[in-house]
Image (cartoon, rainbow, N blue to C red):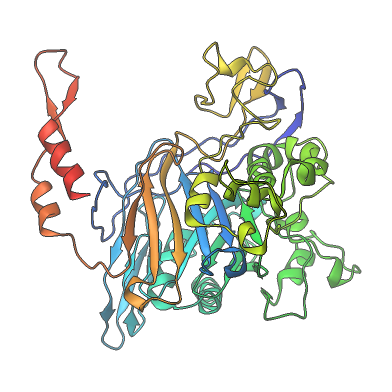
């Protein structure tokens, strides 16, 4: 899995491209992972892992129209395709152990004790309404824990925690216990978590070769607020005496002091997690924080986010955006029908629905400074057709000059996407629902996945025998055509 590049950059205002000095770390291609998987609905491909550039949006219960915390997740990777993993609920005999394999690389990492009881998990949610997602921020290269001897990689943390916990509070405790006991095996991660009552962001990074374990800060999204993150650590300073809303590793500040990332004589209250462990760069702002800016402007309006535009461009890294926003009249405007008269919005009109969150995840930054279609300012990549799509990679060169394309929320390089709701008023087996799709969140048809499912349906089992592709000899040997029968019956199954 490719990790986010650390770059120094000078920006060119004439177009959407930006000159970049230096080069990103080379991407790596993970092999297929091995785990228990049910290939459901549209999932015709191998098990997948997220790419380096994901986007998450957390909606607190107070910001949701029906009071259900929401989590939106685009898992972006240009060379992989989405599938849905199934971990059936089980009771285990004493002294049972489980193997841990790297979710990215299919490498055996070690064994850990198994819990006595594990819950039914399908996709990124479990039977009690707990949902977990992530984006990778990478962080300081010296804190990368790949090949460090640690056992718990970020993917295993997600799915093992989902099998053991019912709430975000339990999930935070479990993730901390797993990495401190067995060691961490990935780089910096921002974990999103929702349960039936709350939404949390947990930002975590390992200790590299310095020590075993990891340091982290977890922040509860305030009621009525929405929080987004996208491959850049977002936690700055934080409250250290509000355990109901902020939790953190006991040595999150002291470890930074030990490795020279925070002054010995500075007060703990001045500690900034991002400055210490994932310092902002042009790439972090332009390719990560710009997506957060785009989500927030659609919730609070362009005028409210205008002061942070230069930051999102990567030009003024000192003008940090707020960690979260409270949706305002900008959301209410989207909720109104076109034929409704304008009026002061009431409180309900500023609440978000699953449908609106799906729409947010389709954004290509239209009608903003970052609009990639070339309609508002010249953009070489848009071409005569004003395309919002860009070929990989994000950075490209012309002679000795390197440029950067914009990175939008919706991208053709998405492996899978979902918007999940954790609904407290429903029984546990159907409490969490994931509106799931493979591929581009801007164009793909979503299907509902409930966490009570425990096996593949009989019709789906029969369909597995029907080839999706049939080779044809009418053209060249390497060409294929779709089997219309296979497509018809698969569509009926969905």
> In the rendered view, does 264 fall on the left or right side of 41?
right
Q: Residue at x 20, y 43 (%)?
A: 491
Q: Check the image and report above or below for 26 versus 383.
A: below
Q: Residue at x 48, y 56 (%)?
A: 354
Could you say where residue 364 lies in the image, as x and y percent from the top left?
56, 34
Could you say where residue 151 lies in the image, as x and y percent from the top left?
45, 66
> In the rendered view, does 333 fall on the left or right side of 177?
right
Could you say where residue 208 lies in the image, as x and y percent from the top left?
61, 59
Instruction: Examine the rendering and report whether any part of residue 423 can be seen.
Output: yes
Q: Residue at x 57, y 36 (%)?
A: 408
Picture quadrant where residue 267 is located: bottom right
Instruction: Examine the rendering and report whether any part of residue 151 can be seen.
Output: no
> In the rendered view, does 328 fall on the left or right side of 432?
right
- In the picture as drawn, the residue positioned furthest to the bottom comes out as 94
Q: Nearer the viewer, residue 338 or 15?
A: 338
Give the total number of marks visible in the rendering: 0
Picture quadrant where residue 30 is located: top left
Q: Check the image and report above or below for 62 versus 288.
A: below
> In the rendered view, does 126 fall on the left or right side of 254?
left
Picture quadrant where residue 189 is located: bottom right
Q: Residue at x 33, y 85 (%)?
A: 116
Q: Check the image and report above or below for 466 versus 377.
A: below
Q: Nearer the viewer, residue 443 or 37?
A: 443
């Amino acid at each position: 899995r490719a990790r986010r590049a650390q770059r120094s950059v000078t920006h060119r205002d004439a177009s959407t491209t930006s000159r970049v000095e230096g080069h990103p770390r080379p991407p790596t291609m993970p092999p297929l992972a091995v785990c228990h998987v049910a290939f459901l609905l549209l999932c015709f491909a191998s098990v997948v892992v997220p790419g380096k550039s994901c986007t998450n949006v957390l909606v607190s219960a107070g910001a949701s129209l029906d009071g259900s915390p929401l989590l939106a997740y685009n898992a972006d990777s240009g060379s992989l395709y989405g599938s849905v993993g199934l971990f059936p609920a089980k009771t285990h005999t004493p002294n049972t152990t489980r193997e841990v394999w790297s979710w990215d690389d299919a490498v055996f990492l070690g064994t850990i004790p198994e819990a006595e009881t594990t819950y039914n998990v399908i996709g990124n949610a479990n039977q009690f309404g707990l949902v977990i997602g992530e984006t990778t921020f990478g962080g300081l290269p010296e804190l990368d824990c790949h090949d460090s001897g640690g056992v718990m990689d970020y993917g295993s943390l997600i799915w093992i925690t989902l099998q053991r916990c019912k709430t975000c509070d339990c999930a935070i405790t479990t993730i901390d216990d797993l990495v401190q006991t067995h060691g961490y095996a990935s780089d910096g991660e921002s974990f999103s978590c929702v349960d039936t009552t709350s939404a949390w962001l947990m930002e975590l990074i390992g200790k590299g070769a310095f020590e075993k374990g990891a340091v982290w800060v977890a922040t509860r999204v305030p009621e009525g607020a929405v929080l987004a993150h996208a491959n850049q650590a977002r936690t700055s300073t934080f409250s250290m005496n509000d355990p109901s809303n902020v939790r953190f590793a006991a040595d999150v500040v002291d470890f930074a002091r030990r490795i020279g990332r925070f002054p010995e004589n500075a007060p703990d209250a001045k500690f900034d997690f991002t400055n210490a462990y994932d310092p902002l760069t042009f790439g972090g702002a332009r390719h990560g924080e710009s997506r957060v800016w785009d989500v927030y402007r659609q919730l609070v309006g362009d005028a409210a986010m205008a002061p942070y535009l230069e930051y999102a461009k990567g030009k003024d890294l000192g003008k940090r955006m707020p960690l979260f926003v409270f949706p305002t009249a900008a959301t209410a405007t989207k909720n109104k029908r076109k034929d409704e008269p304008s009026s002061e919005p009431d409180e309900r009109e500023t609440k978000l629905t699953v449908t609106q969150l799906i729409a947010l995840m389709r954004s290509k930054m239209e009608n903003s400074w970052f609009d990639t279609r070339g309609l508002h300012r010249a953009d070489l990549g848009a071409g005569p057709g004003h395309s919002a799509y860009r070929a990989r990679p994000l950075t490209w060169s012309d002679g000795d000059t390197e440029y950067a394309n914009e990175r939008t929320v919706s991208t053709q390089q998405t492996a899978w996407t979902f918007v999940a709701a954790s609904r407290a008023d429903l029984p546990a087996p159907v409490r969490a629902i994931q509106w799931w799709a493979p591929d581009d969140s801007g164009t793909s048809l979503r299907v509902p996945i409930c966490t009570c499912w425990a096996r593949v349906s009989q019709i789906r089992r029969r369909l597995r025998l029907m080839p999706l592709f049939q080779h044809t000899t009418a053209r060249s040997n390497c060409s294929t055509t779709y089997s219309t029968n296979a497509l018809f019956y698969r569509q009926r199954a969905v």
